[in-house]
Image (spheres, rainbow, N blue to C red):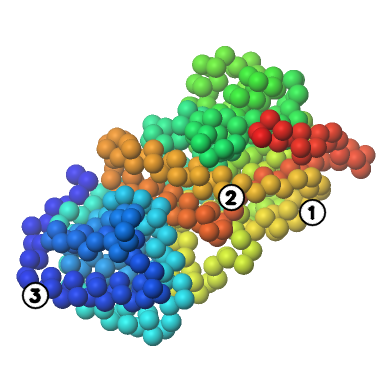
Amino acid sequence: MDATVRRDFPVDPTVQSRAVESLRAILSRLFRDGKARDFAVRLWDGQVLPAETDAGPRFTLVLTHPGALRRMFVPPGELTLAESYLRGDFDIEGDMIAAMGLTTHFVGLTARDWLYLARQVMALPATRPPREFVDGRRAAKLRGLRHSRERDRAAVTYHYDVGNDFYSLFLGKWMAYSCAYFPTEATDLDAAQEAKLEHICRKLRLQPGERLLDIGCGWGGLLVYAAQKYGVQAVGINLSEPQVAYAREWIDRAGVSDRARVEIRDYRDLNPDEPFDKIVSVGMFEHVGRAKLPEYFEAAYRVLRPGGLFLNHGIAAQFSNSPGWIERALFQRGQFQQRYVFPDGELVPVSEALVVAEQAGFEVRDVESLREHYAHTLRHWVHNLEAHHEEAARLTDERTYRIWRMYMSAAAVGFDVGETNVFQALLSKSRHGKAEVPLTRADIYRDHR
């Protein structure tokens, strides 16, 4: 069973009346900036507080029991709110990404505001939802030294053990778990992911017969594309056994098994005696860890031939936006993703990453932000996942569906407002002090405009 159905749901009119009064007081405090509330609230008894805008609600916040807000905000923080959603204390009908944007209303609250809200929330009854999701995906419990080979493999296994079929529900035909490249807003997800693959290959100036290494190759889409269109000899490395199995089957189906292969291998185990002309890493950099960045770039540098290029594509934190220890401790910043999505994942500013790359010996040739592209990609993913809600819950469980729906929606907001960014950095390894990069940036972008 996915949920526990409770038979002791409170129906006392006095309890419900007080809960509604507290809810109205909380909403009034949060929206006292004069902006009309653009969402509706549906209560546990069917009562609806309509949106205050003429356009109607962007979404509906569904509170499933009188004490929902208490369970959502006590103690206050990101993890408390997320776990409340996973349990079923509340739901969101409609635009989940817009709902995740509600956190902006907490910015600028004074200590007096927080005390007022705390009193209102603590006055609510200690009830539980009539249908509580208790089975399914649990928080990660990793052991051992952070970013050791064994722990990194455990972290990867935790994230991808939900299965290839689950990811196929929302990623599209290219099974690309990274931001697409949208030539126009009307471009569909599959075409945009193919444009991203082409964008990468052009930046790398791939030539037939060159050896290409893909660090963290995912399900193998870039390997297949580069082998088919550019005639390279492509090697992918990955720590996820389900992904590797999928990639090998895809390579066979595509008829490029003579030009592409995938290995289960850690980037730290790359062999310098088997060098590559070009290297790419897409969406893996975030899991390396700040302390391991020197080792990561040094490993790539060692196996890249002189004159070669390395394209590193990864999510980065804004320099001024990294949460301090107080935010992490008191408001649980980042703990939801650490526990339920990407354990041990760590974002660093792009400026810091580039310094470490240069210290390893690379020359930085080009840096491009794709922030808006990732926000657009996540909207596609959330829409696809929501459209396959029942199938996703059947393949995994309701909690897993809710985890991915919430994390991807919150990530879209982060990219929209600039809290996070994503960069492609093109790095070169000089030959006799000179890097051979014959094309200009205009040549790369010409076919996309």
Dot 3, how many residues are within 10 Å of its Cα: few (below 14), some (14-19), or many (20+)? Answer: few
Separation of disc 1 and disc 3 at Cα?
Answer: 67 Å
Q: State the residue position of label 2.
A: 371
Q: What's the amino acid at mark 2?
A: Arg
Residue 142 appears in view: no
Could you tell me which quadrant the N terminus lies in? top left
Q: Which residue appears at 30% of the width and 64% of the height? A: 52
Q: Residue furthest front?
A: 54
- Whether residue 54 is situated above or below residue 180 in the rendered picture: below
Q: State the residue position of label 1.
A: 359
Say which mark, if any, is on residue 14.
Answer: 3
- Whether residue 157 is situated above or below residue 12 in the rendered picture: above
Mark toward the start of the polypeptide (3 vs 2) = 3
Instruction: State the SS at label 1.
Output: helix
Dot 2, how many residues are within 10 Å of its Cα: few (below 14), some (14-19), or many (20+)? Answer: many
Mark toward the start of the polypeptide (2 vs 1) = 1
Residue 366 appears in view: yes
